[in-house]
């Protein structure tokens, strides 16, 4: 009887809802000098079915302090507090509350926002060109650095217009573009033939990698692209199976390895707008590229076959 009572009590305890006495509190500070940010907007999110949903909001006091209470401390829910400043959300560390840890203290660091001038610099820009029959596949990787202490948010061109922080001046005739990161893939839009984004850039470095395809039917092709930002170092790699690497304005002496040729910029930073140009020779083309010439040859052969007998009879 005693064992049965224990089992019944245990099952009741397991079925009871988790205690709602969890607390997440802390302070919002500036990342540059760790001073408190008064009256900051703080949002608490929780992972529900694999998605982050806002479950509570509050405003920090004049000393930057905030507090969320009466939170389920079930040991399974993952909370993610964050602070908003200058239209940018800064997430803090993830928190898990349980029976043994019902209170957590976190520090949320935010940055001041800057709209102008643009502080972004590309520390390394690597471009890989892969000629294939009928197409040129291009992959670009940019290490973008914000060396300032503020978050660059860009400047809107007018009312009801989203600010733009980066424009990618890749050739406008690209067939498709794919971003390595889903985050950037969702934030870029095609406006005026250019890929643009309004994603904010906090201090520090971010890597942006993407690829696109250019159609080609010519044996001789010139790939061109202006730089989007001041760039410390550029490396252009041409990968191909057959000889005829072409030339580039990036440097005069290319580095040759088996199956590829690389061009690198010198020690000086290249300005935004500097035009990169690679002259590709002996591009592989599809059989369809020869179709017009084949049709012309067939037509000429047909005319000769029709006219030659007539000419021969008249001259004979």
Image (spheres, helix red, strand yellow):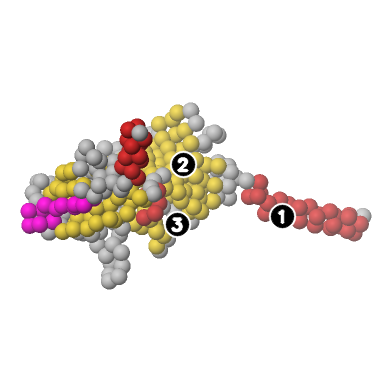
Q: Residue at x 33, y 37 (%)?
A: 5
Are there few (<14), some (14-19), or many (20+) residues within 10 Å of tag 2?
many
SS of the residue under disc 3? loop
- Residues packed near mark 3 inside 10 Å, few (<14), some (14 to 19) or many (20 plus): some
* Looking at the image, residue 189 lies above or below residue 139: below
Give x and y (percent) for residue 301.
78, 52
Residue shown at 32% from the left, 33% from the top: 2
Q: Which residue is mark 2?
A: 129
10 within the magenta span: no
Q: Quadrant of the N terminus?
A: top left
Camera-side residue: 49 or 108? 49
For marks 1 and 3, give the CA distance: 32 Å
**Element at label 2:** strand
Q: Which residue is mark 3?
A: 172
- In the image, the segment drawn in magenta is 60-71
Q: Is residue 28 left or right of residue 77?
A: left
Q: Which mark is residue 173?
A: none
Left or right: 96, with 182 as reference point? left
- Residue 65 magenta-highlighted: yes
**Looking at the picture, how far across and down is residue 285, in whole percent?**
60, 45
Q: Residue at x 32, y 54 (%)?
A: 53
Marked residue nearer the N-terminal end (2 or 1): 2
Image quadrant of residue 89?
A: bottom left
The residue mark sitting in front, 2 or 1, is 2
Return the residue at label 1: 296
């Amino acid at each position: 009887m005693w064992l049965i009572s224990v089992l019944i009590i245990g099952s009741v305890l397991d079925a009871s809802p988790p205690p709602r006495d969890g607390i997440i509190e802390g302070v919002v500070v500036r990342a540059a000098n760790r001073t408190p940010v008064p009256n900051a907007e703080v949002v608490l999110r929780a992972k529900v079915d694999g998605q982050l949903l806002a479950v509570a909001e509050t405003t920090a006091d004049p000393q930057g302090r905030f507090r969320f209470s009466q939170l389920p401390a079930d040991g399974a829910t993952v909370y993610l507090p964050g602070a908003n400043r200058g239209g940018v959300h800064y997430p803090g560390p993830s928190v898990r509350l349980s029976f043994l840890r019902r209170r957590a203290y976190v520090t949320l660091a935010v940055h001041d926002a800057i709209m102008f001038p643009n502080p972004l610099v590309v520390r390394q820009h690597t471009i890989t060109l892969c000629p294939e029959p009928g197409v040129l596949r291009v992959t670009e990787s940019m290490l973008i650095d914000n060396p300032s202490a503020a978050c660059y948010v860009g400047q809107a061109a007018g009312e009801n217009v989203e600010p733009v922080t980066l424009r990618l001046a890749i050739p406008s005739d690209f067939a498709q573009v794919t971003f390595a990161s889903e985050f950037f893939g969702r934030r870029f839009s095609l406006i005026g033939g250019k890929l643009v984004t309004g994603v904010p850039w906090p201090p520090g470095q971010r890597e942006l990698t993407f690829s696109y395809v250019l159609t080609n039917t010519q044996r001789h092709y010139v790939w061109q692209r202006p730089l989007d930002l001041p760039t410390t170092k550029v490396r252009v790699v041409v990968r191909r199976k057959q000889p005829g690497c072409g030339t580039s304005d990036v440097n005069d002496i290319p580095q040759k390895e088996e199956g590829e040729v690389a061009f690198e910029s010198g020690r000086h930073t290249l300005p935004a707008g500097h035009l990169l140009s690679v002259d590709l020779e002996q591009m592989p083309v599809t059989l369809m590229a020869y179709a017009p010439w084949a049709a012309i040859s067939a037509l000429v052969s047909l005319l000769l076959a029709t006219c030659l007998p007539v000419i021969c009879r008249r001259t004979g």
